[in-house]
Image: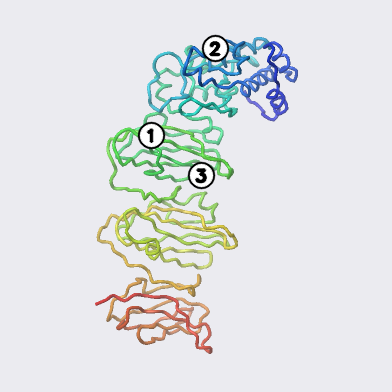
Amino acid sequence: MPVNLEQFKSLDAYASKVNVRNSMENLVNVLLQKAQTDLEKVRAIWIWICHHIEYDVEGFHNKTKRSCAPADVLQSRKSVCAGYAALFEQMCSIAGIQCKNLSGFSKGYGYRSGIALKGETDHAWNSVYLNGRWHLLDSTWGSGIVDDSCTKFTFSYNEFYFLTHPALFINDHFPEDHEWQLLKQPLTFQQFERNACYSPKFYSIGLSEASAKTAIIETENGKAAVFIESHVPALFLVTLNGEKEHSLMTLQKNGVSLEVYPQQTGTHSLEIFAKPFNDKEKDYSNVLKYSLKCCSIDKSISLPKALIQPVGPSWHSEEKGILEALPNSPVIHSDDGRCVVTFTRRKDLDVFATLDSDSSMLSEDTRRRHIWKTCRGSQVELKIHLPHAGDFALHIWAKKASDPESHHCALSYLLSCPNKSVKWPVFPKAYQNWEEGYELVSPLAGILPANRQIQFKLKLPGIDEASVECGKTHPLIHKGDDFWEGDCHISGGSKVTVMISLNANDNTFWSLLEYKVESH
């Protein structure tokens, strides 16, 4: 039934504050003073129960200490699900509303993905007759939540379980009488057990469907893949056995693509969390759980622990100011350890990049020297020469130059190089005088061979003189289009420095780049 929550605003505020204890009849009469239609009567009763009856955690563990009789529930203001449902049915009867008390199996407290539901039924809820049709609701789950040990109850109103669509209600409620599924094609109990369990947040966030329909999924060649379709931009977190590792998350326009690579065979717990992108204050909510069976491990991929998700260009990186990023793929495979990443940055955006690896013994500063950034206005090019084989996380950090806050990760890539003979040196050290409009053509290697003739070529707009200092001073020649070139024989000394002068008349030279010289 389509429900406009705005129309209930004043009714909800009234019903939640009603405090009548002397009799159920008086309570219902007071509640109905603000209710005109049958729908409003049901709403008033629902709101009152959800805000005044707490779950009896002590009674849950000890049957002798609980009562589900409506009168007792009203007086104690606590009960288990059977008491919620009985009270709801009794109050609806007084209000003249047809109501059924239903029982069956549920995927609630204590449920784990893929477990068999055995024994007696474990839950109770209601169905009400409105506008010529039956509708489903669960005031127990509408009222709040219990902790993992069911020793503490917290009021936390949940709108989802008020007149829930049967196709969604069957996700976690299976009535004894199959007719009360209220579906044209009822599910079998085996289907209910097998199906993945979506939390109410899955739908309230704006997610619509997951590609893996069953609670138990299996890896194929060491990988499990899940695609979640979304109506709205949403952010996701993935955990495997509680750890944020071994998964690759790629955002797409209509959802998220997840690849999971367990590093051990056996059965794992895969949980997916989400939140709306436009709600900065909200925490991530658990939206979907799977039991993941892994028969073999894919040893060809190893995701760095430091890898920041999501990976690859997306609407999210565009929101952060990184546009038209290439490559499109979240994973960059390189046989020779080299690759190039290009993108357009929004105006006034300051960017830098870092390399992270679980297998590298190099310091963070040294790893950064394996990335060379060239800026041509809004166009940015990153040359990456990996120091060795392995899997690396390339993180591109950004912030507005005018923003006092620190940089945030705007785009991530996974770089994979299996070639164990790869061993690229660092790029040259750039001093503070190196400006964004400058470009280095050669040499790119920050370590130069001794006793060799090396050609230098740089694009240095706005300078008057340039030279290479290597024991002696070797002037660079201006070749036009702001390019400066020249040869230098590397002999003597342990370093080579590129120098520039902005004004030839004041004879002041500034250090621009520094190279190391290989020892004999």
Viewer-side label of 2, 1: 2
Q: Quadrant of the N terminus?
A: top right
Quadrant housing residue 89: top right
Q: Depth check: 135 or 263 in front? A: 263
The x, y position of residue 241, in whole percent, is: 38, 37
The x, y position of residue 303, in whole percent, is: 36, 48
Kindly identify the amino acid type of the residue bearing the numbered disc 2: Ser
> On screen, 192 above or below 230?
above
- Residue at 35% across / 63% down in the picture? 385
Kindly identify the amino acid type of the residue bearing the numbered disc 3: Lys
For the residues bearing labels 2 and 3, Cβ distance under 8 angstroms:
no
Nearer-N-terminus badge (2/1): 2
How many angstroms separate mark 3 from mark 1 (CA)? 27 Å
User: SS for tag 3?
Assistant: loop
Nearer-N-terminus badge (2/3): 2
Numbered tag placed on residue 515 in the rendering? none
User: SS for tag 1?
Assistant: strand
User: SS for tag 2?
Assistant: loop
- Residue at 42% across / 41% down in the picture? 258
Numbered tag placed on residue 67 in the rendering? 2
Which residue, given by chain and number where applicable, does mark 1 sit on? 269
The x, y position of residue 94, in whole percent, is: 67, 10
* Outermost residue, right side: 33
How many angstroms separate mark 2 from mark 3 (CA)? 51 Å
